């Protein structure tokens, strides 16, 4: 069964703070807005800012906070099935990687209002559901894993998939041809992005342990 998610909003003004500021650890529960756990709804994403920096990708929320995803993303042709049991976030950007839409898959920890205030979307999958996140990008379940597929002839931009928990982080970019992109991670090198940098070790392996010193902002959880 396939269900389409609502259209995204108009592009937003890019406003970023320095990444080297006080951050909330990406896996820390924040006491604000706590309520009992309940069924979660699909939430349509808004257009948010994106920046490719040294060693990863920065996503800029509507509320002015930034979050850093370790990289550089590993190129994968067309589709990826994530490691089981991970939190899965899908980012679709414009061709230049300046802005995009971020969607959490099967997130049961974050209240709808919090997602809406940050611009992050959510899709809840049941059984053999398949959801269209964006024209040309779909997600489905495979046992305890999430499968993300992209028809890049349809997608006018780039597709990134992040799968993580407290133990490890994985970053992928869905591409047409891995050989054509192999070794090309210049966007995530120290010589790019006008000197704006996010702190944190660069992943040289697909599976990298989280660094507790890299405190990032994620939408507050209940």
Image (cartoon, rainbow, N blue to C red):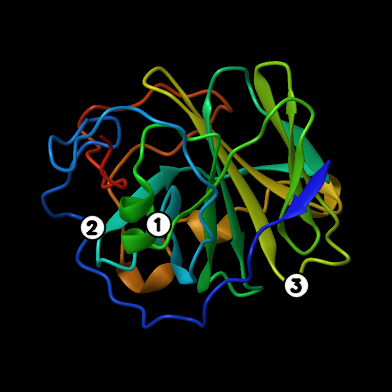
Residue 3 % position (x, y):
76, 51
**Horizontally, is 17 left or right of 12 in the view?**
left
Q: Using the rendered view, name the quadrant where residue 19 is placed.
A: bottom left
Dots 1 and 3: beta carbons under 8 Å?
no
Indicate which disc, 1 or 3, sits on the residue closer to the N terminus: 1
Q: Using the rendered view, name the quadrant where residue 91 is placed.
A: bottom right
Q: Secondary structure at mark 1?
A: strand
Q: Secondary structure at mark 3?
A: loop
**Horizontally, is 32 left or right of 201 in the view?**
left
- The numbered disc on residue 156 is 3
Residue that carries the numbered disc 2 in the rendered image: 19
Name the residue at 46% across, 66% down.
50
Residue 18 % position (x, y):
20, 64
Residue 17 % position (x, y):
20, 67
- The numbered disc on residue 58 is 1
Dots 1 and 2: beta carbons under 8 Å?
yes
Which part of the image, by quadrant, shows the N terminus?
A: top right
* Res 192 seen here: no
Name the residue at 65% across, 35% down.
125
Q: Using the rendered view, name the quadrant where residue 205 is placed.
A: top right
Q: Could you tell me how far apart the alpha carbons at marks 1 and 3 are, in whole angstroms?
A: 20 Å
Indicate which disc, 2 or 3, sits on the residue closer to the N terminus: 2
Q: Could you tell me how far apart the alpha carbons at marks 1 and 2 are, in whole angstroms?
A: 9 Å
* Res 133 seen here: yes
Q: Residues within 10 Å of mark 2 (few under 14, many from 20)?
A: some
146 or 188: nearer the viewer = 146
Indicate which disc, 1 or 2, sits on the residue closer to the N terminus: 2
Q: Residues within 10 Å of mark 3 (few under 14, many from 20)?
A: some
89 or 186: nearer the viewer = 89
């Amino acid at each position: 069964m396939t269900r389409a998610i609502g259209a995204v909003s108009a592009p937003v003004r890019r406003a970023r703070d320095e990444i080297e500021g006080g951050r909330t650890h990406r896996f820390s529960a924040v006491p604000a807005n706590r309520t009992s756990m309940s069924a979660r709804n699909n939430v349509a994403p808004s257009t948010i800012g994106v920046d490719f920096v040294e060693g990863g990708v920065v996503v800029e929320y509507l509320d002015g906070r930034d979050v850093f995803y370790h990289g550089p993303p590993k190129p994968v042709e067309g589709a990826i099935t994530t490691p089981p049991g991970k939190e899965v976030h899908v980012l679709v950007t414009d061709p230049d990687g300046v802005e995009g839409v971020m969607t959490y898959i099967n997130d049961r920890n974050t209240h709808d209002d919090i997602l809406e205030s940050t611009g992050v979307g959510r899709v809840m999958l049941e059984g053999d559901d398949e959801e269209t996140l964006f024209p040309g990008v779909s997600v489905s379940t495979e046992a305890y894993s999430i499968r993300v597929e992209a028809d890049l002839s349809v997608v006018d931009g780039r597709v990134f998939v992040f799968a993580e928990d407290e133990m490890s982080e994985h970053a992928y970019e869905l591409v047409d041809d891995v050989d054509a992109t192999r070794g090309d991670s210049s966007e995530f090198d120290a010589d790019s992005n006008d000197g704006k940098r996010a702190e944190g070790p660069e992943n040289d392996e697909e599976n990298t342990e989280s660094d507790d010193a890299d405190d990032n902002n994620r939408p507050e959880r209940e």
